[in-house]
Every structure is written in C-alpha cells, then in structure tokens.
Image (spheres, rainbow, N blue to C red):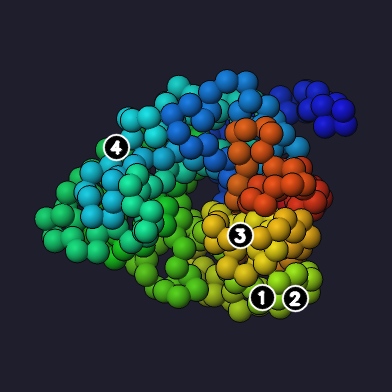
Amino acid sequence: MKKTLALVTLGASLLAAAACHRASDSTDVREFQKGVAYTGYGGTAYEGDGPLQSLQELRLTNASWASVLVTGLQETVNTTSIDFTGPGTPNDASVERIIDRAHDLGLKVMLKPHVDLANDSAHYRGEIGPAFTAADWTAWFASYRPFILHYAEMAARTKCEMFCVGCELGTTAAHASEWRKIVAAVKGVYTGPLVYADNQVEDAPNAVAWWDAVDFIGQDAYPTLTQVGQPSVDDLLSGWTSFRDKLRQLSEKWDKPLILTEIGCRSILGGAQNPWDWQRQGPVDLDVQRNFYEAALRAVADQSWLRGIYWWQWSPEPEDGGPDDAGYTPHGKPAEQALASWYLRLK
C-alpha cells in the first residue's frame, strides 16, 4: 500500500520536472547522473502495462537518469553480421514508448545498444573476432554501422539526452580508425552527448585510444573489492581506493569526465567477490548487496571527475526482485533503500 500511494503522489512534481528538462536540448556535463539501467530483453520486453509500472517504481529510487537497453544479436564471436530486426530485439515502438514514459516521469534517458551472442554461451561480446581477417573486420564494422545508426536516429527522434555508441566491445576497440568513423557517422544523426561503455580499466586502461571522439568516458564496473564472503561497508571501501584511482587516472589522462555506465552486485552470498559473475550459485544475501551499494556511493560522492553512475539492473517486470531474489536488481531489497537515500542527497 505504501508503494502504491508513493506512485500516485509522483504526479505533478514529475510533470514539472519533465517540463524543465525538456526545455533544454543539451546535457550539462557538470550534472551528476543518478542513473539506473532499465534492461528489457526480447522482442516483447517493453510491451504491456508492466514495464510502465516498473519504470514508475524505478523513479522512486530518486534516480534522475535511466539507461534504456536495446540489443542486437550476432550468432557467435566468429560471425560478422548483426541482426536487430528479429524476435530477440525489442521492437522500436515499444522502446520509444518507454523513452517517452521515462521523460514523462522526469527522467533523462541514455539509449544504450548492446551486441549479444545468440548461440555462443562460451564467449561474450568483448571477445568478438578472435580469428578475423582484415576483410572480416571490415564486414563487421559495415554491419555495426547500420545497427548503431538506427538507434542513434531513434535517440534523436525521441530526444534522448545521451547516446551510447557501443558497450564492452573490447576486441573491436583496437580498431580506432573504424571507431572514429562510427562516432562521426553517429554525430551526423544525433547531436547530443556521446559515451562509449568500456570495461577494461582494471586490466587494460589504455585499450581505448579514441576517448577524445566522445564526450564521456564510460566504464562498466564490476570490481572485486574484497575476498570476504560477507563484507562490511568498511571492507568494501578499502577495496575502492585502488579502483577509484584507476578511474580517476583515466579521466585525468584524457581530461574528460567519466561515467560508471554500469555497476552492480547480486544479492547472493559472496556477491562482492567477482560481482560480474551472474552465474554464481548460493543463498540470498541482502546485506552484501546493500553494503556494496553503500560503499560505492560513499566512494563516488564528491569526486569531481566522476559525473554519473548507473546501477545494474532494473527489470521491466514489476514482480522481479524482492527479498527472495538473488539477482542484480535492488528492487524490493535493502539496497533500494540505500540507493534512494543517497540519490536524494547527491547533487
């Protein structure tokens, strides 16, 4: 009942916020983006009433931004064609409806296209092209171009406040000249700020040599901050020191603001040990997730070079989450309360 009443009371204040942010066509790079990743998979993920309710509940975290996920698929790491018209990709009308609803709620939107592998569970997008020839790389970028331009055009059409030109495409990043061409093509159809979401700052901080082409450095961050199975906030804060230094050094090297385009931790025992491990098995542990959120938000507060953080993840299914869930979502868990409290205070 309490959450239902809270949803109803959003009303006029959210409409006013929406009017304010729509009055400006630009994103202030000094703004701290209090974000949550809104992640629907499959062609019908954003259809129906459930995703609208879930988005409204996301707004109750006091988030000011949402990244909206869309996914194109290639068969394996060895194929060069990306499909974004099949049943594995949310249809355009439903994505645009979600973006419009987010704006109605006063949220700013980063549209964030991903490439996933349809039939290659042994690999992920960061390992594309292990045996590609020069001709194969040319073919892959030729396929990536219409995929990313399709969504850049959508971002322009729906007035998204930011666009992500790529996510965790590690092996492709070395092809700097090709990426510069991609970014230039995106700028031809979308005039707002651009970010690329890398995930290599810990092991290969120099892997991307074209950060000057975009407006924000993005990092998808799932750092191992501790080997303690049930860490305290202080345990996790100790691990943040070196990780935060690496982020800061990358930002300072390029003289460019940095955004954590993803960060998250499952509510599972040992979840802070390799938090990227979405397949970990074990009992639910709500405290480890809450402590991870608390430590991260303490660590990033008042860091002038860091201009945003997007928590992974929030499902379009309003039933997802809750005290029996061991996944990444904070919905209905103590981590959601920690997030809402911090986002209320962060400027």
Tell me: 342 left or right of 46. right
Between the C-alphas of marks 1 and 4, the distance is: 39 Å
Q: Name the foreground residue: 103 vs 71.
A: 71
Q: Residue furthest right?
A: 2
| Mark number displayed over residue 90 | none
Between the C-alphas of marks 2 and 1, the distance is: 7 Å
**Mark 4: which amino acid?**
Asp
- Name the spot of residue 211 as percent of width and height, x first: 40, 62
Name the residue beneath numbered marker 2: 235
Disc with the residue nearer the chain's start (2 vs 4): 4
Let me know if residue 217 appears in the view. no
Name the residue beneath numbered marker 3: 281
| Mark number displayed over residue 83 | 4
Quadrant of the image containing the N terminus: top right
Count neighbours of disc 2 (C-alpha within 10 A) and say few if under 14, some if 14 to 19, many if 20 or more: some
Let me know if residue 164 appears in the view. yes
Q: Are marks 1 and 4 in contact (CB under 8 Å)?
A: no
Q: Secondary structure at mark 4?
A: loop
Q: Are marks 2 and 1 in contact (CB under 8 Å)?
A: yes
- Name the spot of residue 123 as percent of width and height, x first: 36, 58
- Name the spot of residue 65 as percent of width and height, x first: 62, 42
Disc with the residue nearer the chain's start (2 vs 3): 2
Name the residue beneath numbered marker 1: 226
Disc with the residue nearer the chain's start (2 vs 1): 1
When asked about the image quadrant of residue 295, the answer is bottom right
